[in-house]
């Protein structure tokens, strides 16, 4: 069980790194710092790769020990005896805590992204309406260089 406990602790560390990135991402979202958001996204991809590798190792270990790959941690803890049980409970609790915090930041960042998207969509509507004189979106003639509703420029060819 020591190996499984080590895997859970490594996973907790990776998710703590996710949490650190989530804090940075929230700041970048608030500041509209898209370069930082892009860098953070790349780091998140790398962390995702690490999580997948740890999950694969966990599944393999569980199978080798005769457990189902998808066994719930609580069911596994019930079957473990001695010091390993206490260590497994502690590791599982730590992982749950960090995952709960990651979810909070994810939900918060998702909300910020939605607000930003709604604002951008609103501004697009405002600008397109002002360009067309309130007549709806501008319509471009096929193959032409002019706008048919709400003229910006009169282009003659």
Image (tube, rainbow, N blue to C red):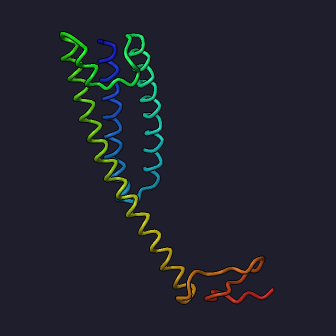
Question: Which residue shows up at 34% across the image and 35% down it?
Answer: 17
On the rendered structure, is 82 left or right of 7? left
What residue is drawn where x is 26% and y is 41%?
101
Quadrant assignment for the N terminus: top left
- The image position of residue 146, as x and y in percent, is 71, 83
Q: Where 134 sits versus 42, above or below?
A: below
Whether residue 109 is situated above or below residue 135 in the rendered picture:
above
Image-quadrant location for residue 100: top left
Q: Nearer the viewer, residue 153 or 121?
A: 121
**On-image quarter of the C terminus:** bottom right
User: Residue 119: image x %, image y %?
Assistant: 41, 69
Farthest residue, direction right:
157
Task: Give the residue at x 29% y 12%.
Answer: 2
User: In this picture, is 37 found above or below 82?
Assistant: below
Image location (x, y in percent) of residue 52? 45, 29
- Which residue is at 44% across, 64% downward? 117
Nearer to the camera, 52 or 80 = 80
- State the count of labels: 0
Image coordinates of residue 105 in percent, x first then y, are 30, 47
**Is 70 positioned to the left or the right of 83 in the image?**
right
The picture quadrant where one finds residue 72 is: top left
Relative placement, left or right, of 44 versus 17 is: right
């Amino acid at each position: 069980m020591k190996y499984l406990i080590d895997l859970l602790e490594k996973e907790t560390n990776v998710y703590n790194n996710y949490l650190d990135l989530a804090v940075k991402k929230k700041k970048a979202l608030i500041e509209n710092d898209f370069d930082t958001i892009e860098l953070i996204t790349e780091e998140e991809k790398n962390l995702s790769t690490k999580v997948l590798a740890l999950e694969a190792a966990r599944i393999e270990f569980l199978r080798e020990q005769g457990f189902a790959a998808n066994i719930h941690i609580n069911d596994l803890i019930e079957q473990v005896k001695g010091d390993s049980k206490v260590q497994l409970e502690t590791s599982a609790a730590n992982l749950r805590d960090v995952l709960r915090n990651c979810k909070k930041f994810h939900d918060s960042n998702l909300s910020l992204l939605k607000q930003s998207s709604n604002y951008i969509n609103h501004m697009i509507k405002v600008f397109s309406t002002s360009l067309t004189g309130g007549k709806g979106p501008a319509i471009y003639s096929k193959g032409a260089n002019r706008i048919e509703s709400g003229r910006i420029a009169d282009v003659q060819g």
